[in-house]
Amino acid sequence: MVRYFVFAAFVVIAIALGLFFTNFPARAAAITWERDYEKAIDRARAENKMIIADMFTDWCALCKQMDAETFAEPRLIQKMAGKYVWLKLNTETEEDGIRLQKEFAILTYPTILVLDSQGEEVDRVDRFLAAAQFTERVESFVDSPESLPNLKKAVQHQPNSVSARYALAEKLLSHNNYAKAGPEFEKVIELDPESREGKTDLSQYNVALCLASQEKFVEAIVELDTLETRFPRSNAVADAKVLRGQIYRCCNKLDEAQAVLREYMDKYPTHGHIQEVENLLATMEAESERK
């Protein structure tokens, strides 16, 4: 009788354990990637998750390295695979990828976008990162006051704040989103024309940079002229000389470009772009000799 009781108890325990392990959720063995943007958005909304979008090209060696090392790392998979909706798009061959490359101004690879469930950018990773670094970086975006959504909220709450507007503009500029960054810098200039908060001269330069980066060279030169006229003692004037020289070169005005860049070297011999300008002048001189 005792032996039967012990055996029966063992069976009950075994069955209970079996049910326990049957109901315990299986760990993901790999990341499941969506390959369609709308499906990823639908899932993100339904599951109340953010999206991690790996924007890649066929020729990007570091993208392939992230696939093989970062996204295949077991601890990353265990911690993050089920927490986000994962989207992978080729920015040169897939329609969604081509569109998002333009929308988010993706210029370098690897670029991994972190999007909210509405498809708005939270932040991005724009370089190769190993699994532990990638996990830490992405997790830091969620509550960071410097994330794009939080910077936008700060501007919404304080639309006339120069510091809030400038922080948003800088973030957009760091993402190469020149079309959106430029108007934010213009708003800084409008809010503080006398540069009482010390951001207007920098904003004037950055407006020119945003225009030049969109190949709006005539408008960019006008902004540089305004900067040098209104803020002749600004540290941004040195950078403006370099940008002006680069614009002239892009416009094939090589004599003007060389003159401006030599003026920069004479006036600012210890400035941070000296080596870059020396190399640019050497390249231009070599090009002139070949002609």
Image (cartoon, helix red, strand yellow):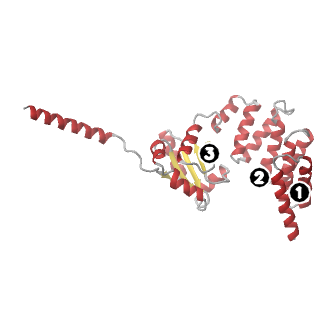
Is 234 left or right of 76, judged from the image as shown?
right
Is 28 left or right of 194, judged from the image as shown?
left
Amino acid carrying label 2: it is Gln
Give SS at disc 1. helix
Query: How many C-alpha atoms fall within 10 Å of the one at disc 1: few (<14), some, or many (≥20)?
Result: many
Distance of mark 3 from mark 2, alpha carbons?
Answer: 21 Å
Q: Is residue 189 above or below residue 93?
A: above
Q: Tell me whether circle 1 and circle 2 mark residues in contact (CB < 8 Å).
A: no
Residue annotated with mark 1: 257
Q: Earlier in the sequence, mark 1 or mark 2?
A: 2
Distance of mark 1 from mark 2, alpha carbons?
Answer: 19 Å
Of residues 241 and 84, the one drawn nearer to the viewer in this rendering: 241
Q: Earlier in the sequence, mark 3 or mark 2?
A: 3
Query: How many C-alpha atoms fall within 10 Å of the one at disc 3: few (<14), some, or many (≥20)?
Result: many
Q: Which mark is residue 124?
A: 3
Q: Earlier in the sequence, mark 1 or mark 3?
A: 3
Amino acid carrying label 1: it is Ala
Q: Which mark is residue 214?
A: 2
Residue 89 at x, y = what percent? 56, 55
Distance of mark 1 from mark 3, alpha carbons?
Answer: 35 Å
Residue at point 72% right, 36% down? 167
Residue at point 65% right, 49% down? 104
Q: Nearer the viewer, mark 1 or mark 2?
A: 1
Residue 30 at x, y = what percent? 44, 50
Residue at point 57% right, 36% down? 142
**Which quarter of the picture shows residue 183?**
top right
Residue 21 at x, y = what percent? 30, 41
Q: Which mark is residue 245?
A: none
Amino acid carrying label 3: it is Arg
Give SS at disc 2. loop
